[in-house]
Amino acid sequence: MWNTTLCYIEKGDCYLLLHRVKKEGDLNRDKWIGVGGKFEEGESPEDCLLREVKEETGLTLTSYRFRGIVTFVSDRCPTEYMHLFTADGYEGELHACDEGELAYVKKEEIERLPIWEGDRIFLRLLREEAPFFSLKLVYRGDTLIHAVCNGAVLV
């Protein structure tokens, strides 16, 4: 099993997204996602969040919220527990990322980009200011075949 973080950094009506175009063999190749990554030994979700955001963007978060846990089940990789955050405060200057291209994207335009189908669900929950949630997403290949949020079946 993997533990990861994912963060959507807010700036006005935009989120900072990473267009994953640089790594060969990347499961997220060509998708637009938030920033984050895998836990290192001994890290808490917050430790991982702060380290990954700094590594991928150059920014130091000063204000963030833990929004939910997303469990990914896939026929391609181990089960992943993604700790989902949003952030609205940071210091520093944005730098280039070796995993893709960083860009601020208007929240209402994200749905038009190539994103994972399950991401549409948790982005809606973020937009609706849902309280802390547990979302399970089951994929077969790139296809979302099952989604459950706080015990309620969505797909």
Image (cartoon, rainbow, N blue to C red):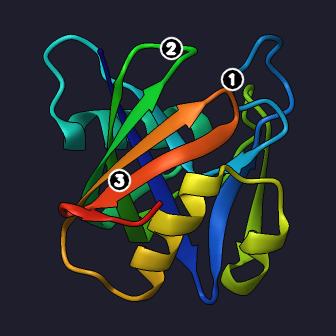
Name the amino acid, label 2. Cys
Name the amino acid, label 1. Leu
Which element carries disc 3, helix, strand or loop? strand
Q: Are marks 1 and 3 in contact (CB under 8 Å)?
A: no
* Label ID, residue 77: 2
Q: Earlier in the sequence, mark 1 or mark 3?
A: 1
Q: Where's residue 63, x and y in %?
A: 30, 69
**Is residue 75 rendered to the left or right of residue 15?**
left
Label 3 sits on residue: 84
Q: Are marks 3 and 2 in contact (CB under 8 Å)?
A: no
Q: Are marks 1 and 2 in contact (CB under 8 Å)?
A: yes
- Note whether 80 is above or below 87 in the view shown: above
Which element carries disc 2, helix, strand or loop? loop
Q: Earlier in the sequence, mark 1 or mark 2?
A: 1
Residue 57 appears in the figure: no
Q: Where's residue 46, x and y in %?
A: 22, 44
Label 1 sits on residue: 27
